[in-house]
Amino acid sequence: MASPPPDNYKWIALSITTVAMLLYSVNQTIVLVALPSIFEGLHADPLAKSGAGYLLWVMSGYTATTTVLLATFGRIADRHGKVRLYVTGFAVFTLGSLLCAWTPSTGDMGALELIVSRIVQGVGGAILSATSLAILTDAFPPNQRGLAFSFNQLAFIGGNVLGVIVGGLLAAVQWRLVFLFSVPLGIGGALWALARLRETGNPSGEPPDWWGNLAFGSGMIVLMLGLTYALVPYAGQSMGWSNPAVLAALGLGASMLVVFVVVESRVQYPMFEPRLLQIRAFLAANIAGFMFSLARGGLQFILIIWLQAVWLPLHGVRFSEVPLQAGIILLPMMLGFLMASPASGLMADRYGAKLLSTAGLVVLALSLVFLATLPGDFNLSLFIIFIFIVGVAMGLFAAPNSTQIMGSVPSAYRGIASGMRQTVTNTGQLVSTAFFLTILIGGLSRQLPSSLERGLTSAGVPAAGAHAAAGVPAGSAVFAALLGYNPVARLLPSGTLAGLPRSVGDRVLGGHFFASLISAPLADSMHVAFLAAAAAALLGAVASGLRGPRVVQHRPGGQPATVIEPAIVLD
């Protein structure tokens, strides 16, 4: 039996887990605006046929790895202790960061090495994310968990936005600094956790669920491969959803997850505890969390594309400068979250999660509908107001929902509950990114070719060159804008502008030209994506509203002590 921790231990646990979640979250987005510098430093072409897959895996390999391993590490934490595993997480994360910064090779081999190193980072991130909320839940009394979780979620959401800014600033100096940034934080976190964290739970020592781990891990890996390569052009099409290999991967991955569900219902010590789904509060909160993640998971990514491909070039910002500018414009979203999250955590401790989480999802849906009303060349003030409301909605939802998930399960299952929760969140984020990009690229592939061909021809480009440029997959144009390249310069065949008047080259290679052509088609696709995300948020609000009643615990004498969510005892 672990000895009771000192009174100030909860604040120590909060500080350490906040650093860990910030580290984990920053590295989900830090490469987004650093990609041009990274691929230039590696002398690799991310827009080449083989480079599209590398580009997507550098962006998503980290999150995909954490998604696969979260539940596994959550179960290991329950069985063998959270603190030792937590220290290991910092160490593995730091090793992965060093390997990313080192990347000795160039070209395709360098890209592959970087992807493998990002996967090592993801292993460390999975450990930190799976155990953070479990450590906090053990350290804080039920009536203060909402506040604790609000700071934890503040670090998570805030880190996503901070990563964009930090990545842009460091990449402007040297791309390897993007990964070295995490090294001192990882070393400091490991030493701090080793010295100050205490094992407050009671590890069970149960054996691992090898078959469950194998079925879940293989199923998720194959599914992620399918989702990733579904976004890569195939057989002259803008995306690979018709690729037999993609369809086979999606089918096999889904089948393996079905096998996993069957295995978990039969083994004695499952890694993904299905009996937790008997808890109404736990089940409803996780469904709401998945829909929330589906609605906002890819939102920041496509907002960056919108800013970088259309709005900033239309307003005279050079393509090489748009990534960092896009990150700065998105800061009001973080501000809205910063303002709402601590307050929602405090109110969740007093009033429960149902009202706040449901309200957060409804507000998110409304803010997405507002964004769907904006044209391609939108009014910046309105855009800032709308993304600020998005941030407020995220702040209203995140901490109360996490409070309910972690407060609804018995203490012996908090590690796996935390892992299950983050697995659901990450899965929603990965599906969301594929979902948003499918809508975006699919819409552009129908409208962009004709718009681009007409625009180039009217600007004086020969018909053959204009036709060839219009035949390039729409995804290449999107990725070019995301990477800070001038898309027209990448799409026109070599030598097309030779012999033409200089004014023609100046016009078609100016950022305003491509942005004006893509503005309407991109805005139309964005509107569809926003409305679909709003529908997901409303479905999440319905699930959130189906949570069970709160339970009020009382101190001797009848005074209310705290408000918690109902929990059941699992034998």
Image (tube, rainbow, N blue to C red):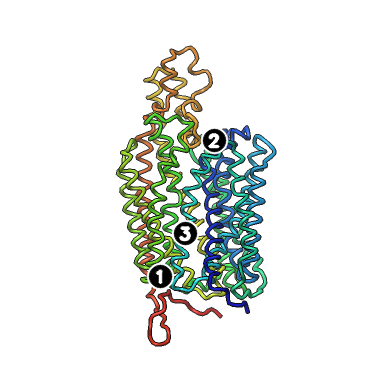
Q: Is residue 371 above or below residue 268?
A: above
Which image quadrant for residue 102?
top right
Q: Which residue is mark 3?
A: 153
Q: Classify 535 as above or below 79.
A: above
For residue 93, above or below residue 168? below
For image coordinates 54% across by 67% down, the residue present is 134
- Looking at the rendered image, the quarter that the N terminus falls into is bottom right
Residue extending furthest right?
104
In the rendered image, residue 219, in percent from the top left (x then y), is placed at 59, 57
Q: What is the C-alpha distance between the residues marked 3 and 1?
A: 15 Å
CA distance separating discs 1 and 2: 43 Å
Give coordinates of residue 465: x percent, y percent.
47, 21
Q: Secondary structure at mark 1?
A: helix
Image coordinates for residue 85, horizontal then vertical, percent: 64, 64
Amino acid type of the residue tagged 3 in the rendering: Gln
How packed mark 2 is, by other alpha carbons closer than 10 Å (few <14, some 14-19, many 20 or more), is some
> What's the amino acid at mark 1?
Asp
Element type where label 3 sits in the image:
helix
State the residue in front, 503 or 227.
503
Q: Position of residue 286 (x, y in %)?
A: 46, 64
Q: Is residue 259 visible?
A: no
Which label is found at residue 249?
A: none
Q: Looking at the image, which residue is at 43% across and 36% down?
A: 308
Secondary structure at badge 2 equals loop
Tag on residue 349?
Answer: 1
3 or 1: tag closer to the N-terminus:
3
The amino acid beneath tag 2 is Ala
Q: Could you tell which of marks 1 and 2 lies nearer the N-terminus?
A: 2
Question: Which residue is label 2 attached to?
Answer: 172
Quarter of the C terminus within the rendering:
bottom right
Crowding near pointer 1: few (<14 within 10 Å), some, many (20+)? many
Q: Earlier in the sequence, mark 2 or mark 3?
A: 3
